[in-house]
Image: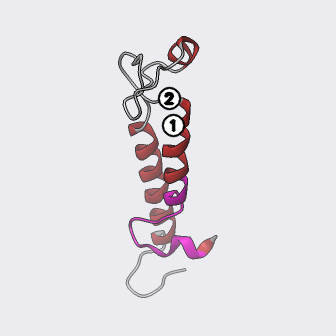
Amino acid sequence: MASGWANDDAVNEQINSTIEDAVARARGEIPHGESLKECEECGEPIPEARRQAVPGVRLCIACQQEKDSHSASQAGYNRRGSKDSQLR
């Protein structure tokens, strides 16, 4: 169903673009490189088990949880300003 000047798949294209943006953002947050021995935020030591479990880790658990809580509050925000959020 077309509305105005939009093509028939406009809503699906907006939804797909939003998903692609979220995937790209998540991939950009994946740690890479050598793990740090101390947290780059607070300077606390990062346990050896965490460094082995998460290659490229840069933050201690407490700082990572803080970062994740701030990221979660922005997860539902539609940066493109499309109307796909109205479909939820």
Find residue 12 and name its label: none
Q: Is residue 24 above or below residue 34?
A: below
Residue stretch rendered in magenta on the structure: 72-86
Q: Is residue 13 magenta?
A: no
Quadrant into which the N terminus falls: bottom right
Q: Do residues under tags 1 and 2 come within 8 Å of each other at their CB atoms?
A: yes
Residue at image position (52%, 45%) is 66
Q: Nearer the viewer, residue 19 or 77?
A: 77
Q: Nearer the viewer, residue 26 or 37?
A: 37
Residue extending farthest bottom = 4
Q: Position of residue 8 (x, y in %)?
A: 48, 74
Q: Position of residue 55 (x, y in %)?
A: 47, 18
Residue at image position (50%, 29%) is 60
Residue at image position (35%, 19%) is 33
Q: Nearer the viewer, residue 5 or 24?
A: 24
Is disc 2 surrounded by few (<14), some (14 to 19) or many (20+) residues within 10 Å?
Answer: many
Mark 2: which amino acid?
Cys
Mark 1: which amino acid?
Gln
Residue at image position (42%, 75%) is 7
Q: Nearer the viewer, residue 15 or 78?
A: 78
Find residue 60 and name its label: 2
Check disc 1 and report the residue beneath it.
Answer: 64
Q: Is residue 34 above or below residue 30?
A: above
Secondary structure beneath dot 2 equals loop
Quadrant into which the C terminus falls: bottom right
